[in-house]
Image (spheres, rainbow, N blue to C red):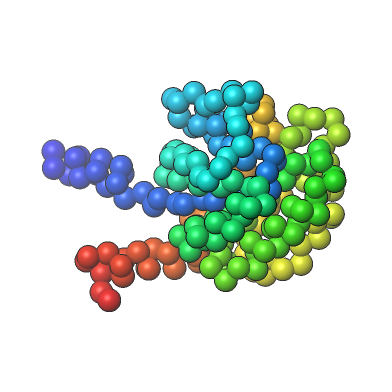
């Protein structure tokens, strides 16, 4: 009986908790993505898109995705709020960067913001999932087209992927999350953060 309960305890409590940043400039659909994730991966009903307002500060979502515990930090993307992003970099296992693929006039702003994220030393090696969002709109560029436009040359050796998604109807979200969990579980950054957490914990050495 003990071994049965121990096995259950180990299954419930030994899962790694991953911290994932949801970044992007304003009005790209970051919060809509988080609400769609809630509706797809939990019993909680996410807010409908017409009730979502621009994020000022931080939205948090805790979900279990592909048998992993994920904490999503959705940060406001207005220009004046982007300075707070870096406060969360050090503890992040991965970054989701959301781009409005239907708004070419703002691609340059998204590219500049993303390059600053990628260059930051506190995010070194963090897997990067770039979402070409709003694929429910006919004018949206595909992730392949968007990737050519963004022309990111400083991705170093990190794992990254461009993916077509729609935060509105859920297209591509499950496949994106499956990829993200898989790469985080194998990531050197995850191992570094795990070691750091053990050192900081009461039972760890200093």
Residue at point 81%, 38% (across, down) = 102
Residue at point 81%, 60% (across, down) = 151
Say which of 105 and 43 sits in front.
105
Give the side of residue 190 with respect to residue 195, left or right: right
Could you say which quadrant of the image residue 7 lies in?
top left
Looking at the rendered image, the quarter that the N terminus falls into is top left
Say which of 74 and 39 sits in front.
74
Residue at point 60%, 51% (across, down) = 81
Could you say which quadrant of the image residue 166 lies in?
top right
Instruction: Pick out the residue farthest to the bottom.
Output: 206
Residue at point 70%, 57% (across, down) = 113
* Above/below status of 118 relative to 28: below
- Residue 143 coordinates in the image, percent (x, y): 77, 46
* Above/below status of 85 relative to 39: below
- Residue 82 coordinates in the image, percent (x, y): 61, 54
- Residue 76 coordinates in the image, percent (x, y): 59, 46
Residue 101 appears in the rendering: yes
């Amino acid at each position: 009986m003990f071994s049965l309960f121990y096995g259950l305890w180990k299954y419930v409590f030994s899962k790694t908790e991953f911290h994932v940043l949801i970044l992007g400039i304003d009005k790209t659909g970051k919060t809509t993505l988080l609400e769609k994730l809630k509706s797809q991966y939990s019993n909680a009903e996410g807010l409908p898109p017409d009730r979502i307002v621009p994020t000022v500060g931080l939205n948090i979502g805790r979900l279990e995705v592909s048998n992993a515990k994920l904490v999503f930090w959705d940060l406001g993307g207005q220009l004046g709020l982007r300075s707070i992003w870096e406060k969360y970099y050090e503890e992040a296992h991965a970054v989701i960067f959301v781009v409005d693929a239907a708004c070419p006039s703002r691609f340059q702003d998204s590219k500049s913001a993303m390059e600053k994220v990628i260059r930051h030393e506190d995010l070194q090696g963090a897997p990067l999932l770039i979402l070409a969002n709003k694929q429910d709109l006919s004018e949206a560029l595909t992730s392949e087209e968007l990737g050519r436009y963004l022309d990111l040359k400083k991705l170093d050796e990190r794992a990254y992927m461009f993916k077509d998604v729609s935060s509105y109807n859920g297209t591509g979200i499950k496949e994106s999350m499956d990829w993200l969990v898989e790469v985080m579980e194998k990531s050197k950054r995850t191992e570094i953060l795990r070691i750091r957490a053990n050192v900081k914990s009461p039972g760890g050495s200093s």
